[in-house]
Amino acid sequence: QVQLVESGGGLVQAGGSLRLSCVASGRTFTFSRYGMGWFRQAPGKERDFVAAISWSGGKTYYADSVKGQFTISRDNAKNTVYLQMNSPRPGDTAVYYCAAKFMSTPTVGGDYDYWGQGSQVTVSS
């Protein structure tokens, strides 16, 4: 069984910074073979793609709305993927989810194999 556990969410002021972490575990789960993605869902809205990183970390993808503002990274030795959020805006308020996909790095949520439980991020103005 694979588990993805997000942490680091909370309340942040607009213009501040926040880093989300997602730790993956599982008896037969090889983190370095999985592309990882971050998605978010605001109240009353659909889940949206935020960022993704390939299993080696060599390729990254971002939604246009967060390019230049958020940075995705990973540490395969720690089975962890990060989302650095710089200068967030109130519009970035959402539950943030990490997801894992075997040997691929999709930008569509439905293509992912495993999901975390989510971490609330609230950006105050």
Image: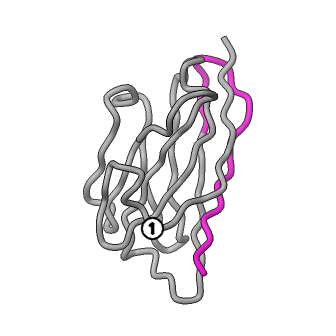
Location of the N terminus by quadrant is bottom right
Q: Quadrant of residue 44?
A: top right
Above or below 92: residue 114: below
Location of the C terminus by quadrant is top right
Q: Residue at x 61, y 36 (%)?
A: 18
Any magenta on residue 17? Answer: yes
Which coloring applies here?
one colour
Q: Residue furthest left?
A: 59
Q: Residue furthest bottom?
A: 28
Q: Residue furthest right?
A: 11
Q: Residue at x 30, y 72 (%)?
A: 103
Please tell me whether the stretch drawn in magenta is mainly helix, strand or loop.
strand
Q: Is residue 103 left or right of residue 70?
A: left
Q: Is residue 123 left or right of residue 67?
A: right
Q: Residue at x 46, y 75 (%)?
A: 31
Above or below 17: residue 30: below
Any magenta on residue 73? Answer: no
Which amino acid lies under the numbered mark 1 shown in the image of this protein? Asp
Assess disc 1: are there few (<14), some (14-19) or many (≥20) residues with their C-alpha within 10 Å of its C-alpha: few
Residue 115, horizontal then vertical, whole percent: 55, 60
Residue range (magenta):
1-18
Instruction: Tell me the element at label 1.
Output: loop
Residue 22, horizontal then vertical, whole percent: 58, 58
Pick whichever, 91 or 124, lies toward us: 91
Q: Which residue is mark 1?
A: 113
